[in-house]
Amino acid sequence: MTFVITTPLYYVNDKPHLGSVYTTIICDTIARYKRLVGEDVIFITGVDEHGLKIQRTASEKGVKPQSHCDEISEIFNNNWKNWDISFDKFIRTSSNNHEFIVNEFYERVKSSEDIYMGVQKGWYCVGCEEFKDNPENSSTYKCPIHQKNLEWKNEENLFFRLSKYQEQIEKIINEPSFIEPVERRNEILNFVAKGLKDFSISRTNVSWGIPVPGYDDHTFYVWFDALLGYVSAITSNSKDVSLKKSINGGWPADIHLIGKDILRFHAVYWPAMLISAGMKVPKKVLGHGFLTREGQKMGKSLGNVLDPDILLSKYGNDPVRWYLIKDISLGNDGDFQDRRFVDIINNDLANTIGNLLNRTSSMSRKWFDNKVPNNTKITIDNVLENFANIAVKNYIDKFENYKLDQAANEVLNLAINTNLYLNDNQPWILIKEENNFPIVQEIIYNVLESTRIIGLLLLPLLPNLSSKINEQLGSIYTKEIPWEKQLKWGLLVSNSSLPKPTPIINKLEYEKHI
Ligand code: MSP
């Protein structure tokens, strides 16, 4: 089955920030998991290159919008490679293929009689590329997200008949699985209950956009254009482009993972546009929260922006992934705290998982000739086997419901329980008596086997650490056998060689300013 998952298409006004890294890492984790359980995944990311915001950014730099976009798009593309993001498609909305799809889509919407000319008046945030509701209630006329002045617009635009889709949208958003988590769903239910208004889909004052056929000065509104990037991405690499091909290539998307600020576009405007064009709506819109730093909103003016490049080069991929996945419950806001980051990585990854592997592999090599001991199966009720089986079951269940933090905690708990099992059984004391040899074999086998399963469960969460664990256990994971089958207890081969242990994760030092 094809499984399509998307990140938002990021504005190219600046290089990636921690928020974009967060969304992309979460998508990557889900994409990797879905591949492991046998889905044919299309993981889409890319950049949103048109519109007033980008036009202005380029003009402030004194360069042509296209060359600005080329530069920043390249940075995004390379950045995701540096983060080892397993994306399948990278869509640029300034590409010809994309423009072709936008035009084809527009023709469909037009033939549904959903386009008309009207006058658009209102207060606009260029940062959000969005008209704001009721700014007259605000004394500042500022965008609450960007803290920048809104701009008054009054111009002739083409409109899309969103109001016509009131009932259909209500039906879609009432489906509990469509918008998650429930708080996000409630926001949208309230918004739609107020009655949907038509929205403008063209601009006359923005030259950096896709021209609207038949209307000389009009370009498509950047959101109308950008949302279609999810569709054009499917055929982005092919010579032969058409809506039909994209639809056959995997549409609709299974998940749009987005931040809570762009929910309306994805959960209301976008489904209506798709219905109008005779296309299927996405299956799920998953809205995550916002990241703050030490409790404060990150911003250039506050000087507290955390540069993801620095995080990556200083600490590496696994620690940042672990913190973002495990410490933030998907859907809630999250806070990046330097001290907490260091503590979590040292406790969870270095002391609990890293140490477990290191000490068990060392004991096994020392006592059993650099090999995995025999699985003597002396104990009838194997507690560690029971723990592992429950952890695997819960983990799958959490992943299927996109509770990634809870899935990560299942792995950590298994590691904690495995360490406890080792401490309770004290094989280093038992080994002193020759009679105990078979029971020590069993204990060490169990602990190594549990560690193997921990490594496998980490595969979608921390691919690098997972492969290091696998190597230290003699590279037993194989892509030839379904991953889920390899989660079965008892597959570690007795008497197989164990390579010399090397530390799989370094402890971090706390520095005042990351
Ligand atoms: N270009 C649009 C999306 C078009 S999708 C067809 C856009 N781009 S963006 O670059 O401004 O934002 C991309 C994503 O980053 C959004 O989902 C937004 O919620 C997210 N974040 C921006 N700041 C964030 C944090 N501080 N924390 C977490 N995510 C945040 O919107």
Image: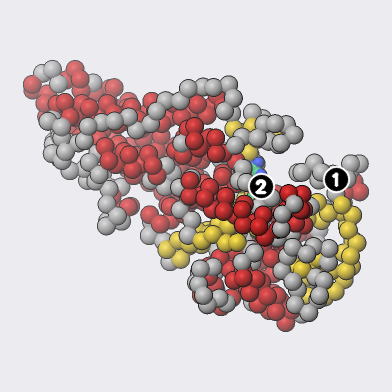
- Residue furthest out toward the left: 434
Choose top left, top right, bottom left or bottom right for residue 97.
bottom right
Q: Nearer the viewer, residue 405 or 320?
A: 320
**Numbered badge on residue 149:** 1
Badge 2 local density, few (<14 within 10 Å), some, or many (20+)?
Answer: some
Choose top left, top right, bottom left or bottom right for residue 67.
bottom right
Where residue 14 sits: x, y (%)? 66, 47
**Mark 1 vs mark 2: which is more N-terminal?**
2
Which of the two discs, 1 and 2, sits closer to the camera? 2
Q: What residue is drawn where x is 22% and y is 41%?
A: 474
Q: CA distance from mark 1 to mark 2?
A: 20 Å
In screen coordinates, is 484 left or right of 68? left
Q: What residue is drawn where x is 73% and y is 65%?
A: 209
- Is residue 191 visible in the rendered image? The answer is no
In this rendering, the answer to whether 192 lies above or below 456 is: below
In this rendering, the answer to whether 248 lies above or below 149 is: below
Question: Mark 2 = which residue?
Answer: 14
In screen coordinates, is 297 left or right of 243? right
Tag 1: residue type? Asn
Badge 1 local density, few (<14 within 10 Å), some, or many (20+)?
Answer: some
Q: What residue is drawn where x is 76% and y is 44%?
A: 145
Q: What residue is drawn where x is 46% and y is 36%?
A: 316
Tag 2: residue type? Asp
Q: Nearer the viewer, residue 70 or 350?
A: 70
